[in-house]
Amino acid sequence: MAEMAEMMIGIDTNVLLRWLLDIPEDADQRSSVARFMETADQPIFISLPVLLETVWNMRRRYRVDREQIAKLVQFLISNRQTVIAEDKAIRDAMLGFVKHGGDFADHLIGALNRDAGCSTTLTFDKRAARLDTFTEIT
């Protein structure tokens, strides 16, 4: 049987958002998250779905601009306390998201598929098809 990796603590999107953003109506929850992060004795794991939901909420609900989102994601990647799934693909996707616009999820899908060895990703989405990792299927 394989050895168990170091234990981590996973967090949900609502926790990550309160850690990253100063949301006035959630001040008590933000304080709780800050206390937890200060005392956590295990790495904090951020899964791909949590990161995708976080970026989506920052853009759509909280109107955070692309550059600020990129800074926050870079903070998560470089923070010694956090472990992010697929961090190379996330870096590549965030670069494309800031540089070329579009949807972060599309950039991430393209980067993950490319890293898996795909020559392209087929799509009916005309916006995604503009990315160099996608091909529109007609």
Image (cartoon, helix red, strand yellow):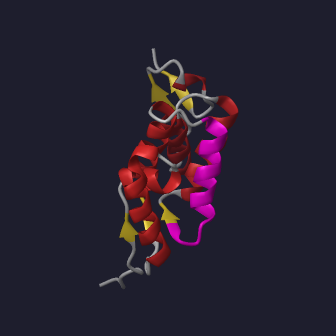
Q: Nearer the viewer, residue 2 or 100?
A: 100
Magenta-drawn segment: 65-82
Residue drawn where x is 47% and y is 46% of the image: 23
Q: Position of residue 54 (x, y in %)?
A: 45, 45
Residue drawn where x is 47% and y is 28% of the image: 122
Q: Is residue 83 visible?
A: yes
Residue drawn where x is 50% and y is 44% of the image: 113
Q: Provide the major secondary structure of the magenta segment.
A: helix
Count the marks: how many?
0
Residue drawn where x is 59% and y is 56% of the image: 88
- Compared to 113, does 19 lie above or below? below
Q: Nearer the viewer, residue 52 or 17?
A: 17
| Residue 72 magenta | yes
Q: Position of residue 30 (x, y in %)?
A: 43, 57
| Residue 79 magenta | yes
> To which quarter of the image does residue 33 belong?
bottom left
Q: Nearer the viewer, residue 137 or 23?
A: 23
Q: Quadrant of the C terminus?
A: top left
Q: Position of residue 74 (x, y in %)?
A: 63, 55
Q: Residue furthest top?
A: 138
Q: Position of residue 117 (x, y in %)?
A: 53, 48
Q: Is residue 94 visible?
A: no
- Compared to 70, does 106 lie above or below? above
Q: Quadrant of the N terminus?
A: bottom left
